Image: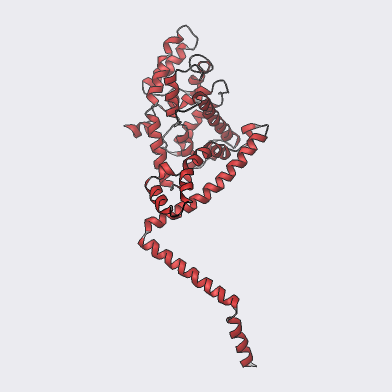
């Protein structure tokens, strides 16, 4: 009986199923060992490969989510009120990400194209990829570089605001608006309530989007990292509306105190402030000032929100650090 039992056990061990499992486990061990060899000999290449593969998964996930958000927005009578802050941010950012990443994704599907794609994305991740593929350090570095480029357009737009002051002679808003611009010119910022007093200037002549001179419009586009192509004023209005809807979503979800440190930083960058050297309480304070203005903005005064990076951030030390 012992011999029979031993024979059955040996047959069991040699069954095709067990042989396949053994072969598969050996193969997996071989792959793992080969991966370790590659990591040892080509650490940079493997690091890029891993980031790219993780980025693809996150990008695909967010792309599917974007289409769900788009469908939700177009079918709901509540408009943006049916979306969360994160959904609005994704709705705003994802189309640009899809356009930016599309060439690399298409190229990577071609035979042997990976030999070209991986070196390119390693050398130019900021231009060829989006935030799904970036490390946390890269996200901060690229956000700071984008903010630096924005800041070079603050002074030209501020000059455009100043140039219209004389046309307000005799109007009720002249003195208060002159006071606001004077504070900015002297190195400090006006209070939100002083800014809001002049909101009527952004509902018509001279600062409504329809009344702005072409040079003023170009400055705003550059200041908000937008291209100089078609439908300039319409796209600026859409940008202001998105910013306003994000602000309102923050309010609906409990306010700024519910945002993480990383979310506060991204919120500041999006609104024209470099937050890298700032404490949490300083970011919350600055964003609360922005929100105070945003609360009174409506569809007729969206232009005011587009100018808030200057009105609230022109003299911020954290911004000046980037360009001086």
Most foreground residue, 11 or 76: 11
Q: In the figure, is residue 52 to the left or right of 258?
A: left
Number of marks: 0
Is any atom of residue 277 visible in this view?
Answer: no
Q: Is residue 232 above or below residue 42?
A: above
Q: Is residue 304 above or below residue 108?
A: above
Check the image and name the residue furthest to the left. Answer: 324
Check the image and name the residue furthest to the top. Answer: 170
Give the residue drawn at x 52%, y 27%.
235
| The C terminus: image quadrant | top left
Residue 260: x, y in percent? 51, 42
Is any atom of residue 167 visible in this view?
Answer: yes
Q: How is the image coloured?
A: secondary structure
| The N terminus: image quadrant | bottom right
Residue 279 sits in quarter = top left
Give the residue drawn at x 46%, y 14%.
176
Residue 74: x, y in percent? 64, 34
Q: Is residue 190 above or below residue 121?
A: above
Q: Is residue 62 above or below residue 29?
A: above
Most foreground residue, 38 or 142: 38
Give the residue drawn at x 39%, y 38%.
144
Residue 164: x, y in percent? 43, 14
Q: In the figure, is residue 251 to the left or right of 127?
A: right
């Amino acid at each position: 009986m012992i011999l029979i039992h031993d024979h059955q056990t040996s047959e069991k061990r040699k069954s095709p199923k067990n042989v396949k499992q053994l072969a598969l486990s050996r193969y997996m061990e071989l792959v793992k060992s080969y991966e370790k060899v590659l990591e040892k000999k080509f650490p940079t290449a493997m690091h890029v490969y891993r980031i790219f593969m993780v980025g693809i998964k996150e990008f695909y996930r967010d792309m599917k989510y974007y289409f769900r958000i788009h469908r939700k927005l177009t079918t709901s009578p509540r408009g943006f009120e049916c979306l969360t802050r994160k959904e609005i941010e994704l709705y705003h950012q994802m189309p640009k990400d899809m356009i930016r990443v599309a060439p690399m994704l298409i190229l990577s599907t071609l035979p042997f194209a990976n030999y070209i794609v991986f070196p390119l994305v390693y050398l130019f991740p900021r231009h060829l990829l989006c935030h799904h593929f970036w490390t946390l350090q890269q996200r901060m570095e690229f956000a700071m570089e984008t903010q630096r480029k924005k800041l070079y357009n603050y002074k030209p737009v501020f000059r455009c605001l100043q140039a219209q002051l004389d046309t307000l002679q005799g109007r009720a808003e002249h003195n208060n608006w002159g006071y606001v611009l004077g504070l900015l010119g002297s190195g400090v910022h006006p209070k939100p309530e002083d800014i809001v007093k002049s909101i009527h200037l952004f509902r018509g002549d001279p600062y409504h989007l329809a009344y702005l001179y072409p040079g003023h419009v170009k400055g705003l586009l550059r200041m908000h990292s937008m291209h100089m192509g078609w439908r300039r004023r319409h796209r600026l209005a859409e940008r202001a509306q998105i910013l306003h809807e994000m602000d309102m979503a923050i309010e609906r979800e409990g306010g700024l105190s519910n945002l993480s440190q990383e979310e506060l930083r991204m919120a500041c960058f999006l609104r024209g402030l470099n937050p890298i050297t700032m404490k949490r309480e300083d970011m919350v304070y600055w964003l609360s000032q922005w929100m105070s203005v945003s609360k009174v903005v409506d569809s007729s005064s969206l232009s005011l929100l587009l100018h808030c990076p200057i009105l609230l951030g022109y003299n911020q030390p954290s911004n000046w650090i980037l360009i001086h």
